[in-house]
Image (cartoon, helix red, strand yellow):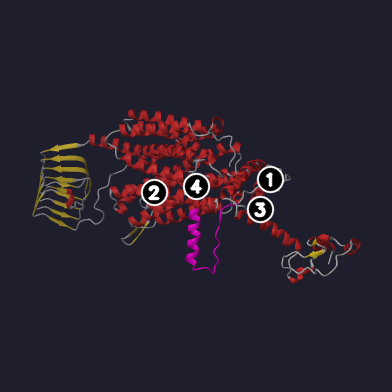
């Protein structure tokens, strides 16, 4: 046996009372042999390299003494941790995280800002663009989908709200999971759910299944927003973070513009589709839904080539994987700058102490669903612990203030975004009703109507032996009129009613003049033959062009606000940006009292959207920076974004209910919410000089 082993074996012995005792480790040491003399050791080891020696016991399966000592050293602190108070362990972890935060900031600065960050910028931008598209899809398809699916007003309202409900659940659930499973993995799951169910929703025919698909699609896309900002922020240095997160927000605007442009160019072409028999129809609005899933699919494919967040890997103790990714970032940026010879100088990165207890279920334990049930419940418990952590004394006040700011911002913004188009439509209806033609006591006999009657009221008229063939009634009302020996054939109608009329010996053949359109009428010897099949609901004739134009201009109007917020975010700070933007938006609300025309409402909408976008961007940035990495956005922002979607649901419901009744309540509610939220935001701590904890 070589000299090094002999030394180590002799060291393991202890001289006690004139005898040598072997260590009690369960291995035979050959204790009866005398120890070698120093000269003999030199002779034995002469000409041998210690690093190249092979331990004899290796061939017999006996562990090397060095390995035993190393395992004992590793085992000792682990055993000690079992008996340490959890508070002590958490305090040690917090100290480690603080050291990691400053070291990681220096590492990111060494890696530089270049090709890698810009590549990730566009990949995550597509995911954020998909989120922007999802908000607009249902609003654009409703005018066409309501005819195909025969949707009542309540059905349409539920379809509009169900997407926000899915987003609310997805933000909390998937955001929280991202702190346990990883940013990239959870973002892929979110995008895959959205892409699959958005694609499927374009083919389903029934209202219930379509509603379910949009709910799950919203759940998937709801998780992207928290994860995207956490993911991207962990590749940015402190001096670049505010500006580039603000630039990333522009993709939400691009998503709105994309959705508006695609709706404008696809939906009006009703013939872009196909039919299979009389039951299955694939019209142009379904093509639009299909096209709107493309940004999500593109981001999903590109994300497969991006690495996991190294900061997340360090938080869970995966040092080597994180180091390799940071080296990849460094080398990519240096090659792009023409400096491939620059070496990544970091050799070791501090990893926080791992406190969480993970349960590994053996494959022989229980059934497969029992093993999965334990894993799922364990993960959900850890997510819930993160939620509670955001409400601990250290973060409780910041979380509550941020929650109020997010909620007031969402209530006013999403409420007004719905209220603007509804008010424009109401102003159009008022103008349309003002042009109504009224005919009193007209008498018509032996006449054939084969043209469209629109926006008319006929009172106390008499129609004898008249024919109504191949024509359309649009917004026509007959009051206290007489129809005798008349003939209606192939007639279609919308918002047309017969009220207090007398109809004698009249035939209705292949018409959609159903029973509910005759109000308090007397039908004498009249016959209804072969009524038109299909939906019996009258739909409003929407000006599709105006809907697309309003959404397009509203999305485009945030461009100046995006640019200003990106350039000034790191100069004036996040707090002043939020407070200033919300107060300016509140002032814009008061000018809505003077919006008495369509053009004025569109103008004030653009001004409001442009002023409020800076507050949204600053809220995104400050929420990233206020919480530690393992609680950031993924959990904390998921909670706040879920609360934001709840505010959107309330805003949509409350503001739309006052359309045509009064403008005072929506305007005062929005402006007061913005003022209150803006003033409260000024009490939040400034984070622009803060490293990511």
Of the 4 image quadrants, the one containing the N terminus is bottom right
Disc 3 packing (10 Å; few <14; some 14–19; many ≥20) = some
Mark 2 and mark 1 lie on one chain; the one further toward the N terminus is 2
* Earlier-in-chain disc, 2 versus 3: 2
Nearer to us: label 2 or label 1: 2
Q: Secondary structure under badge 4?
A: loop
Q: Position of residue 422 (x, y in %)?
A: 32, 39
Q: Earlier in the sequence, mark 4 or mark 3?
A: 3
Q: Nearer the viewer, mark 1 or mark 3?
A: 3
Label 2 residue SS: helix
Comparing labels 4 and 2, the label whose residue is closer to the camera:
4
Query: Eyeballing the image, is 28 above or below 536?
Result: below
Rendering coords of residue 90 (x, y %): 58, 47
Q: Mark 2 — residue?
A: 165
> Bounds of the magenta span?
354-381
Which label lies toward us, 2 or 3? Answer: 3
The residue nearer to you, when weighing 377 against 676, is: 377
Measured in 3D between alpha carbons, the distance from the residue under mark 1 to the one under mark 3, in whole angstroms, is: 22 Å
Work out how far the residue at label 4 is from the one at label 3, CA to CA, in angstroms. 26 Å
| Residue hosting label 4 | 635
Residues at badges 4 and 3 in contact (C-beta under 8 Å)?
A: no
Q: Which residue is mark 3?
A: 320
Q: What is the distance, in whole Å, between disc 4 and disc 2 at their CAs? A: 18 Å
Q: Earlier in the sequence, mark 1 or mark 3?
A: 3
Mark 4 Cα shell of 10 Å, populated few (<14), some (14-19), many (≥20): many
Q: Earlier in the sequence, mark 4 or mark 1?
A: 1
Is 377 colored magenta in this rendering? yes
Provide residue 68's location: percent of width, then percent of height: 72, 62
Residue 463, labelled with which disc? Answer: none
Residue 335 — which label?
1
Residue pictured at 32% horizontal, 62% vertical = 277
* Circle nearer the N terminus (4, 2): 2
């Amino acid at each position: 046996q070589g000299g090094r082993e002999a030394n180590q074996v002799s060291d393991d012995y202890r001289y006690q009372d004139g005898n040598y005792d072997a260590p009690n480790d369960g291995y035979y040491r050959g204790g009866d042999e005398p120890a070698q003399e120093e000269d003999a050791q030199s002779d034995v080891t002469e000409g041998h390299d210690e690093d190249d020696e092979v331990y004899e016991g290796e061939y017999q399966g006996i562990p090397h003494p060095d390995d035993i000592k190393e395992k004992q050293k590793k085992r000792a602190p682990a055993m000690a941790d079992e008996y340490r108070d959890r508070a002590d362990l958490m305090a040690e972890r917090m100290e480690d995280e603080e050291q990691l935060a400053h070291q990681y900031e220096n590492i990111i600065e060494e890696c530089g800002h270049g090709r890698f960050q810009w590549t990730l910028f566009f990949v995550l931008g597509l995911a954020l663009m998909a989120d922007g598209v999802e908000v607009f899809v249902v609003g654009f398809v409703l005018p066409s989908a309501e005819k195909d699916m025969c949707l009542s007003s309540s059905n349409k309202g539920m379809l509009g709200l169900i997407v926000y409900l899915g987003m609310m659940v997805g933000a909390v659930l998937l955001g929280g999971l991202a702190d346990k499973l990883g940013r990239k993995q959870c973002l892929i799951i979110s995008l895959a759910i959205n892409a699959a169910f958005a694609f499927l929703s374009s083919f389903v025919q029934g209202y219930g299944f379509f509603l379910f698909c949009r709910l799950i699609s919203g759940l998937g896309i709801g998780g992207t927003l928290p994860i995207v900002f956490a993911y991207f922020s962990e590749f940015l240095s402190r001096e670049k973070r505010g500006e580039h997160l603000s630039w990333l927000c522009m993709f939400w605007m691009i998503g709105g513009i994309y959705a508006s442009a695609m709706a404008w160019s696809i939906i009006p072409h009703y013939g872009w589709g196909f039919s299979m028999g009389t039951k299955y129809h694939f019209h142009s609005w379904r093509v639009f839904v299909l096209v709107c899933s493309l940004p999500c699919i593109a981001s999903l494919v590109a994300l497969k080539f991006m690495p996991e967040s190294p900061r997340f890997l360090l938080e869970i103790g995966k040092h080597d994987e994180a180091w390799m990714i940071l080296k990849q970032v460094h080398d990519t940026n240096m090659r792009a700058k023409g400096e491939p010879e620059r070496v990544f100088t970091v050799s070791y990165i501090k990893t926080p102490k791992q406190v969480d207890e993970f349960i590994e279920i053996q494959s022989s334990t229980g059934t497969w669903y029992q093993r999965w049930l334990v894993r799922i419940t364990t993960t959900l418990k850890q997510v819930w612990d993160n939620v509670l952590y955001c409400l601990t004394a250290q973060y409780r006040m910041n979380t509550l203030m941020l929650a109020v700011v997010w909620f007031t911002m969402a209530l006013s913004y999403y409420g007004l975004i719905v209220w603007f188009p509804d008010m424009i439509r109401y102003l159009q209806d008022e103008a349309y009703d003002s042009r109504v033609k009224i005919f009193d006591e007209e008498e018509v006999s032996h006449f054939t109507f084969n043209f469209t009657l629109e926006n008319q009221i006929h009172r106390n008229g008499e129609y004898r032996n008249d024919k109504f063939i191949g024509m359309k009634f649009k917004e026509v009302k007959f009051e206290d009129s007489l129809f005798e020996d008349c003939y209606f054939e192939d007639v279609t109608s919308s918002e047309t009613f017969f009220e207090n009329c007398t109809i004698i010996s009249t035939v209705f053949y292949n018409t959609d003049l159903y029973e509910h359109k005759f109000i308090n009428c007397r039908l004498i010897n009249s016959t209804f033959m072969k009524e038109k099949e299909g939906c019996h609901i009258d739909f409003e004739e929407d000006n599709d062009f105006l809907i697309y134009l309003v959404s397009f201009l509203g999305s485009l109007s945030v461009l100046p606000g995006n640019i200003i917020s990106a350039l000034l975010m790191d100069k004036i700070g996040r707090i002043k940006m939020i407070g200033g933007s919300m107060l300016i938006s509140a002032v814009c609300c008061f000018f809505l009292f003077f919006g008495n025309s369509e053009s004025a409402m569109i103008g004030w909408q653009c001004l409001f959207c442009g002023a409020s976008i800076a507050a949204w961007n600053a809220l995104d940035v400050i929420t990233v920076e206020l919480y530690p990495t393992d609680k950031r956005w993924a959990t904390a922002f998921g909670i706040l974004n879920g609360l934001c979607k709840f505010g959107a649901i309330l805003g949509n419901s409350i503001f739309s209910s006052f359309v045509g009744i009064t403008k005072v309540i929506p305007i005062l509610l929005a402006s007061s919410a913005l003022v209150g939220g803006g003033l409260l935001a000024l009490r939040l701590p400034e984070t622009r000089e803060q490293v990511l904890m």
